[in-house]
Amino acid sequence: MFNKILIANRGEIALRVICACKELGIRTVAIYSEADRNSLHVRFADEAICIGPPQLSQSYLNIPSVISAAEISNVDAIHPGYGLLAENANFAEVTETSNITFIGPPPEITRLMGEKEKARAAMAKAGVPILPGSEGVLAGEGEALEWARQVGFPVLIKASAGGGGRGMRIVRNEEDLPGMFKAAQAEAAAAFGNGDLYLEKFIERPRHIEFQVLADRYGTVVSLGERECSIQRRHQKLLEESPSTQMTGELRATIGQILSTTLSKIGYVNAGTVEFLMDEDRKLYFIEMNTRIQVEHPVTEMVTDVDLVKSQILLAAGEPMEAVLQGPVGHRGHAIECRINAEHPEKFTPSAGKITAFHPPGGTGVRIDTAAYAEGIIPPYYDSLIAKLIVRGKDRNEAISRMARALEMFIVEGIYTTIPLHRRILADPDFRAGRVDTTFIPRLFEKQEKAAAEADTSSVARKGKYA
């Protein structure tokens, strides 16, 4: 087992890794920028090292600085968390070259899955269902048009090295394709330093379903079931739940077995998430794999009672799967996670500043993952996520009621947060009935605008009646 781990991240995920390490008896080293000097992950780690100014490129994304911090603190391993350097194969290689264990998959697997069109090809070869689309990177607009005609409009142009919705465009007709292609290419090049694009069939109103997997060094891969991640805004997830209301036991077992066989063949190790789109006929199509822990991992932890971060550490230390899981994985109840962001709940503009009051909810079945606190500062340099509110109920109805209660009791003052938006989502009849897909948020806002317009019309009519 490791004696000391450096956490190459910040915020709630850094604190989450510290918690797992403390329970395993492992010492921790936090890295921080000058903006995060008073952060909780700095306070609760056994050691902390400042690695630079607030800008990401000069601190958390500065690989030489991170490796230097690891070497001077004499750590055995580095946990990258999610985001930042978590899926950077070069970082993983440098870590291993420095004789430090990288808590994640081998660099070559991260590189394979990071290039989306190569990941598609690998999965298709292994028999995993994928969306019809181009075979490899598109040479230009002409080839994109040929594939679009073959696949049939609408199509989705996507960045090969991308994620988070960047370098992605929906194209509904031939006339729009050249402009959309150029825009996606420019955005991908700016965001990822790689303008390569590929194309796939676009599914109207799909569900976004992802499967959590764990893999040891000895070829054993286990699927821990799925998460429903369909409630998104601009491809950014807002709320996740497990299990999905559309998943059957038979389909879950089938996909789990396919993933176990496929990932074992390619040599996958550690935690990972395989993402699918589900059409109206409940058919699943592979879209990408994330070679790291996910933001939404707590919903899987809540229904399986498997600590995924501890599992990552144990697997990286060479423990076999039977020692990590210690028996078959069961599923209990229903879990929901709301991502609480420091953003305006309707305009979605960032809201940096001081938190003047902070009271997280508690009670049966409620979990809060956060590094925020009263009088703490939300800096403008980083991701806007400040807390993850997770609940578990005996079924989906109880989980919804519990989350609604918890959101009502969650006090954050001094900044805007997305708590009001989450309360609206929970109250919506379509959400409560399980009628969700990736267009849910736009439809929710359309309902609000329609209701406001009807209220204005009614108000004008009343004024006219009594004038």
Image (cartoon, grey):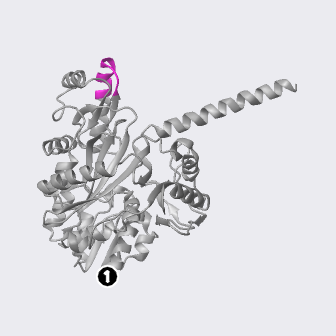
Residue at x 25% of width, y 53% of height: 256
Residue at x 33% of width, y 76% of height: 21
Kind of residue indicated by mark 1 = Gly
**Magenta stretch: includes residue 39:** no
Residue furthest front in the image = 250
Q: Tell me where the magenta segment starts and ends, as one range.
A: 171-181
Q: Residue 204 location, x and y as percent?
A: 38, 31
**Magenta stretch: includes residue 180:** yes
Q: Is residue 203 above or below residue 369?
A: above
Residue at x 34% of width, y 68% of height: 306
Q: Is residue 4 visible?
A: yes
Q: How many marks?
A: 1
Residue furthest top in the image = 175
Q: Is residue 10 visible?
A: no
- Rendering quarter of residue 80: bottom left
Q: Residue 449 location, x and y as percent?
A: 60, 33
| Image position of 373 (left or right of 438) | right
Q: Residue 344 location, x and y as percent?
A: 55, 47
Between 202 and 92, the one lying in front of the other is 202
Q: Quadrant of the N terminus?
A: bottom left
Q: Is residue 353 above or below residue 30?
A: above
Question: Which secondary structure, mark 1?
Answer: loop
| Image position of 5 (left or right of 41) | left
Q: Residue 326 location, x and y as percent?
A: 26, 73
Residue at x 34% of width, y 57% of height: 294
Q: Quadrant of the C terminus?
A: top right
Decide whether the magenta segment is chiefly helix, strand or loop: helix
Reading the image, the residue beneath label 1 is 25
Crowd band around label 1 with a 10 angstrom C-alpha radius: few (<14), some (14–19), many (20+): few
Q: Is residue 38 above or below residue 355?
A: below
| Image position of 421 (left or right of 234) | right
